[in-house]
Image: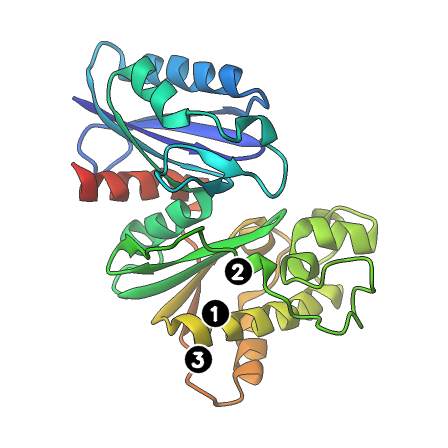
Amino acid sequence: MSYVLFDIGGTKTRVAVSEDLKTISDSVKFDTPKDFSAGTKKIIEEAKKLIGGNKVQAMAGGMRGILNGEKTGIIRDPGMALSTWEDEPLAEVLEKGLGAKVYLENDAAMVGLGEAVFGAGIGHDIIVYLTVSTGVGGAKIEGGVVDDYSYGFEPGHQILDIDHTILGEDIEPTLENLVSGTALERRMGVKPYDIPQSDAVWDQLAMYLGHGLRNSILYWSPDAIVLGGSMIVGDPRILLDDIIKHTNEAMNDVVPTPLILDATLADQGGLYGAMALLNQKV
């Protein structure tokens, strides 16, 4: 028996297989097709290659966007990268193609679950996971389970620049528009990886992020915060020590600042999260 794991992002999709729900035995990565039918066909084809002649016991994976209430597909992709996947029967198509039950979760929440169970969050009960890359997403994980929600977690859309003094009147003053790679490129005119680590903008981003983390700490009261995404674990990056410093300053002793940690599972966090979810479901 094999378990199929997947992680559908706006740019890349990863498919993997596990035999024991403890380790990943093989995986593949490919460009995410923008077309829903092409995307699901590719996932099914790659999964069949990975499992060989084995039977699929169950599947789980993360999908970018806002899931419907039944968690069988997405109703909206705010970033519009996979807008043709909206309102499509993702779980149903995969189940028919591979003959096994499919469990879906938001991609950022799935990575957070992976980090909580298999990565940096091990040993901590209440985890806030935040990813800072082209956008900003995240989730709250408690007791190794993604917290219940009605429409999903969107920490990147919290308003920070209330009076528009930083971003001006034409840009929504959210955390995402302050610290994401897309926002940085828009302001600086170059890709984030072309900005030297010595540039003062990296400390400025740490300050903005610290204020966003302050809200997460006050709302969710975590034992630890795990940070991932290319703006955090890439090179150059928003430095962890600067984030901790600015978060402490933003907290101003209202409550103690929890541990703030780098993610450790690299680009396989979503696959490990899928494995953790299957351990709960099967």
Residue 11 shows in this picture:
yes
Residue 52 versus residue 130: which sits nearer the camera? 130
Question: Which residue is identified by label 1?
Answer: 216
Q: Position of residue 81 (x, y in %)?
A: 62, 34
> Label 2's element?
helix
Q: Is residue 13 above or below residue 127?
A: above
Amino acid at pointer 1: Ser
Amino acid at pointer 3: Thr
- Compared across the picture, whether 47 is left or right of 21 comes to right
Mark 2 and mark 1: Cα distance apart in space = 8 Å
Question: Closer to the camera: disc 3 or disc 2?
Answer: 2
Q: Position of residue 213 (x, y in %)?
A: 52, 70
Amino acid at pointer 2: Pro
Residue 239 versus residue 83: which sits nearer the camera? 83
Question: Which residue is identified by label 2?
Answer: 155
- The quadrant of the picture occupied by the N terminus is top left
Q: Position of residue 107 (x, y in %)?
A: 44, 42
x 68%, y 69%: residue: 203
> Label 3's element?
loop
Question: Based on the displayed image, in which of its 4 quarters is residue 171 positioned?
Answer: bottom right
x 34%, y 12%: residue: 49
- Say if mark 3 contacts mark 1, CB within 8 Å: no
- Say if mark 2 contacts mark 1, CB within 8 Å: yes
Question: Which residue is identified by label 3?
Answer: 257
